């Protein structure tokens, strides 16, 4: 217990006597509750089992953590933010009906089946049945992303985007793959401005001039579909627009090279060469991945040049390509929430992603845009 402000008119929360001390945690966290004051150490100790409940944050408090999903705080942590963006409060975790097929991590946050799978070491060739399951999941993921895209506008929060994605996903009988994956608290990743990837939706309204990446993944009838796109919010500066378009072109050129016999590492050279033509840098900390009945598996697909990843593409393999391209340095830093990855110089980043199936003649883009898909900025 520590002495706090003038307590002359305050009463002990337990016995009603004149207050002499204030709970140090309440004082530290600037909690104004009248029940944080006590007349003595003895009264405080006896009241502690009940009083400590006031220290728990409300259910919509931002998840700050040094270990993903473990600790909550009512205030922002001490952190050297690299840009203008700051985290805001998040809404409680959205629920999924029990009638919907859910991955093993849905309850406890650990994808045990994925961790133990042989698919982490050997790139699987998908059977016709698996391919059909993937096609259905990827088409649904595209439809969900398009609904999120249509909802983007100045004043709309990323938490609202999360609601749109969540409701569209469960409405189709699917599970939002990010939800509780290694304790990720929301149903979609929304990465604004300097956020490279894994941004957590919150109550910050999107502002005129922002850019935002929306990364949708769904788990449908035993298969995952995964894609993302970066969008403009209102009137965006030309440099940001060109960053988005250049990132799209990086992905498009990499996809054009996919076919049996091509080394996975070659995609990084293609993406890096295109990015450098525009004076941009390629993020190195994150890569594309195999996908199917598991959310993430082999192969890894680095996006930067001269990477050493082994292996060649084979007909029937499925994986994502998802380059993250930065205006400034390629280097990244992770926020205290354990998820949000930002550029170290605070400059903007963009990303596009597709899930692909290697075919005999090239590849099939399982998450391809539909005729009904809202246009990107240069398509308008």
Image (cartoon, grey):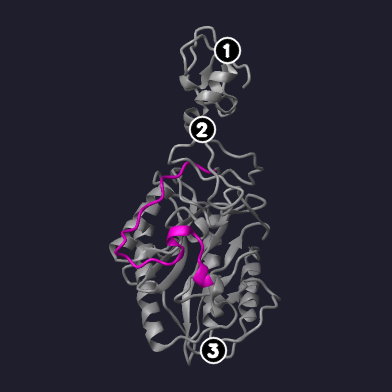
Proximity of marks 3 and 1: CB atoms separated by less than 8 Å: no
Compared to 118, does 40 lie above or below?
above
State how far apart marks 1 and 2 are (Cα): 20 Å
Q: Position of residue 208 (x, y in %)?
A: 45, 46
Q: Among all residues in the image, which is located at the extreme bottom?
A: 360
Magenta portion: prevailing SS class: loop
Of residue 323 and residue 298, the one placed in the foreground of this image is 298
Segment colored magenta: 87-114
Proximity of marks 1 and 2: CB atoms separated by less than 8 Å: no
Compared to 322, does 6 lie above or below?
above
Tag 2 residue: 55
Tag 3 residue: 314
Can residue 150 be seen here? no
Which label's residue is closer to the chain start, 3 or 1?
Answer: 1
Q: Check disc 2 and report its element: helix, strand or loop.
A: helix
Q: Check disc 3 and report its element: helix, strand or loop.
A: loop
Q: Position of residue 174 (x, y in %)?
A: 34, 66
Of tags 3 and 2, the one toward the viewer is 2
Q: Check disc 1 and report its element: helix, strand or loop.
A: loop
Tag 1 residue: 20
Q: Please tell me how many numbered marks the rendered image carries.
A: 3
Q: Position of residue 249 (x, y in %)?
A: 53, 71
């Amino acid at each position: 217990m520590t002495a706090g402000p003038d307590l002359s008119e305050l009463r002990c929360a337990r016995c009603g006597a004149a207050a002499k001390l204030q709970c140090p945690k309440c004082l530290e966290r600037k909690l104004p509750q009248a029940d944080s004051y006590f007349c003595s150490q003895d009264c405080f100790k006896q009241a502690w089992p009940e009083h400590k409940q006031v220290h728990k944050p409300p259910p919509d408090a931002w998840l700050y953590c040094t270990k993903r999903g473990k600790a909550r705080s009512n205030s922002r942590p001490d952190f050297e933010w690299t840009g203008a963006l700051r985290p805001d409060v998040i809404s409680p975790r959205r629920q999924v009906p029990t009638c919907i097929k859910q991955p093993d991590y849905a309850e406890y946050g650990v994808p045990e089946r994925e961790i133990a799978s042989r698919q982490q070491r050997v790139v699987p060739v998908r059977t016709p049945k698996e391919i059909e399951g993937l096609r259905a999941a990827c088409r649904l993921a595209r439809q969900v992303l398009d609904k999120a895209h249509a909802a983007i506008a100045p004043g709309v929060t990323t938490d609202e985007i999360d609601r749109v994605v969540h409701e569209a996903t469960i409405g189709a009988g699917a599970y939002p793959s990010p939800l509780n994956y290694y304790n990720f608290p929301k149903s979609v990743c929304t990465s604004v401005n300097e956020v490279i990837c894994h941004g957590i939706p919150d109550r910050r309204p999107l502002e005129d001039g922002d850019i935002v990446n929306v990364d949708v993944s769904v788990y449908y009838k035993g298969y995952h579909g995964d894609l993302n796109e970066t969008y403009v919010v209102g009137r965006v500066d030309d440099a940001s627009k060109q960053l988005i378009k250049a990132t799209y072109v990086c992905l498009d050129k990499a996809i054009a090279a996919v076919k049996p016999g091509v080394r996975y590492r070659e995609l990084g050279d293609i993406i890096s060469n295109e990015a450098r033509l525009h004076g941009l840098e390629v993020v190195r900390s994150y890569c594309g991945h195999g996908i199917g009945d598991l959310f993430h598996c082999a192969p890894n697909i680095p996006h930067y040049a001269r990477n050493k990843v082994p292996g060649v593409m084979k007909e029937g393999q499925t994986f994502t390509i998802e380059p993250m391209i930065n205006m400034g340095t390629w280097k990244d830093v992770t926020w205290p929430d354990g998820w949000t990855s930002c550029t170290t110089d605070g400059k903007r980043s963009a990303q596009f992603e597709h899930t692909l199936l290697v075919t005999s003649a090239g590849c099939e883009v399982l998450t391809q845009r539909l005729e009904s898909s809202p246009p990107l900025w240069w398509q308008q």
